[in-house]
Amino acid sequence: MTMTDARILTEETPKRSGAFSRWLSMLWADKFAFFAAIFLLIVLLCAILGPYFLGDAANKMNLRGRNAAPFHLRHGIMYVLGADALGRPLLARVIVAAQNTILVAAAAVCASALLGSALGLVAGYSRRSAAQWIMRLGDVIMSFPSLLLAVIVLYMLEPSVANIVLVLAITRIPIYLRTSRAETLEIRERMFVQAAKVMGASNTRIIFRHILPVMLPTLVTIATLDFAFVMLAESSLSFLGLGIQAPEITWGLMVSQGRPYLTNAWWLSFWPGLAIILTTLSLNLLSNWMRIALDPTQRWRLEMGGRKNG
């Protein structure tokens, strides 16, 4: 490493740490968003590490502890939330089920966001007839209620993880398609885009270097909100018996499995249902913070709040 490289590295390190502390300060300015981010981080760690450490415990049956009530530790710490109809600890099952729930929602949101945004960029920037065909495709998809379309398709197909992701991704494409098209139509008329055209920049460079970075914060905020909706849709499908099937587990499937025992073992459905509610609420709180933090015209509110708290 030369002296120049070392100097550049030492200059960039404080900038990166300063940017991180700045964003952390803005997050701390909104206490609800801060604790929502912590909760989502815990859920993400459970989804990644839970099956490796608690996979066996989540499937281990203990018929003597069937429908064991919560907060009684005579069967061990894993039974602090109670047990299901086969004596399996609910704490371990809720943690392990986070992986499938988060995986399905993340895959569906990423697929729909990438495809919908790409089609929206083409429809907004191109002046050819193909742009109209893309918008009509979005209108056709939106003409069907998303959950009803998912129920019909999964009723005809095998309710596997791939089919669930495919159906949920297709139903969410119009949201990103319409948003990215509207943003592209507005951004392409700005002066810096016109200047790039005059300087001879190609259409690909204009789209990826000038238009996409401007609209990316809006798409990220929408994707965060949409993540909560897709997770609820997957839970609804699992509750109806059209989602992921046993022996795999999701939070929605756990709620469905506890439905026959609501009168005498309410905790079977309560804890996975609470996990769904808290995760959805945290995503909504975090998306509201991102809407302000990613907007340069409104970011000063969080920056001022962070300075006062500091």
Image: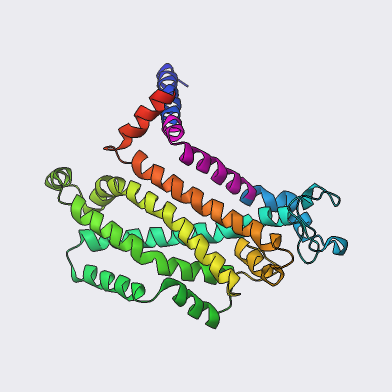
Image quadrant holding the C terminus, namely top left
Residue 71: x and y, percent?
76, 50
Q: Residue 93, relative to residue 233: is it above or below?
A: above
Magenta stretch prevailing secondary structure: helix
Q: Is residue 160 visible?
A: no
Task: Report the side of 77 relative to 114 (left or right).
Answer: right
Identity of the residue furthest to the front in this view:
263
Q: Nearer the viewer, residue 147 or 133?
A: 147
Is residue 34 located in the magenta-colored stretch of the structure?
yes
- Residue visible at 58% across and 59% down in the picture: 101
**Between residues 27 and 260, which one lies in front from this camera angle?**
260
Identified at 35% across, 45% down, the residue is 291
Near-viewer residue (8 or 231): 231
Tell me the residue at 25%/54% (across/down).
183
Tell me: residue 79, above or below residue 134. above
Q: From what the image shows, is residue 28 above or below residue 194?
A: above
Q: Write down the region rendered in magenta.
A: 23-46
Q: Please indicate whether residue 103 sits to the left or right of residue 114 in the image.
A: right
Color encoding of the figure: rainbow
Judged from this view, the residue extending furthest toward the left is 198
- Residue 272: image quadrant is bottom right
Q: Is residue 6 visible?
A: yes
